[in-house]
Amino acid sequence: KDGDGDYFSTQNAGNAGGEIYWGGDLGYASDVWVDGRYVDAYENFVPGEKFENHPTSSIFIKTDLPLVKYKTEYKYNYDTGKYVSYSTVTSVEIKKNNVLFNYSSDDNIWTASYGSIENGYAYYDKIKEFVEKGQLDKKYLDMVTLTPDEVKALKVDRILMLFPINTLFMI
């Protein structure tokens, strides 16, 4: 059996957005590790694939995700004649969510995709900025990234030969 996209569809996948879901109803996975299996660029489950053959593919898992709310103020800088933005964290909430992590070759890490984070909350870059400015604990940045060691520990290729039985992710 090869998946044609429907094998990997779900109505309950959270809001991973258009990156792997069209409208949130009919799901598809493309060049991504899902539920211990590899799904290729044509949305087919590929039996026997190992992580070492696709080490930079995206990873889709259910995990805790920080929802960082912030406000931004703009102040006029008389020296430059331009407005400067200043952002401040107003609240942080942790929510279990389905998250698509995309590989960043610049940093050799996977970061939570924009589509995985609800509108109105800080994305990876903004969370990183808040951590660097001392406004946010580094643990929140760690929650939106996966290091190579963390990916190895996830055993993303743990189900090499089993075909999906149901039409939903088992996460």
Image: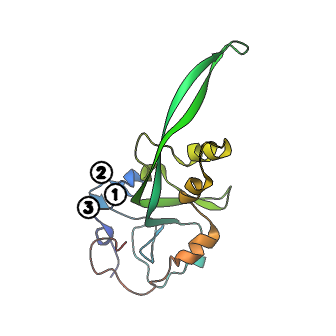
Label 2 element class: loop
- Quarter holding the C terminus? bottom left
- Local packing at callout 3 (Cα closer than 10 Å; few below 14, some 14-19, many 20+) is few
Q: Amino acid at mark 1?
A: Gly
Q: Are marks 3 and 2 in contact (CB under 8 Å)?
A: no
Q: Specify the label residue 156 is tagged with.
A: none
Residue drawn at (30%, 72%), measured in percent from left and top? 7
What residue would you read off at disc 2?
Answer: 23
The kind of residue on which mark 3 rests is: Gln
Q: Please provide percent x and percent y for residue 2.
A: 35, 78
The local secondary structure at tag 1 comes to loop
Residue lying at the far bottom of the rendered structure: 161
Q: Which residue is mark 1?
A: 14
Mark 1 or 3, which is nearer the eye? 1
**How far is the residue under mark 3 from the one under mark 2?**
10 Å
Give the secondary structure at mark 3: loop
Q: Residues within 10 Å of mark 2 (few under 14, many from 20)?
A: few
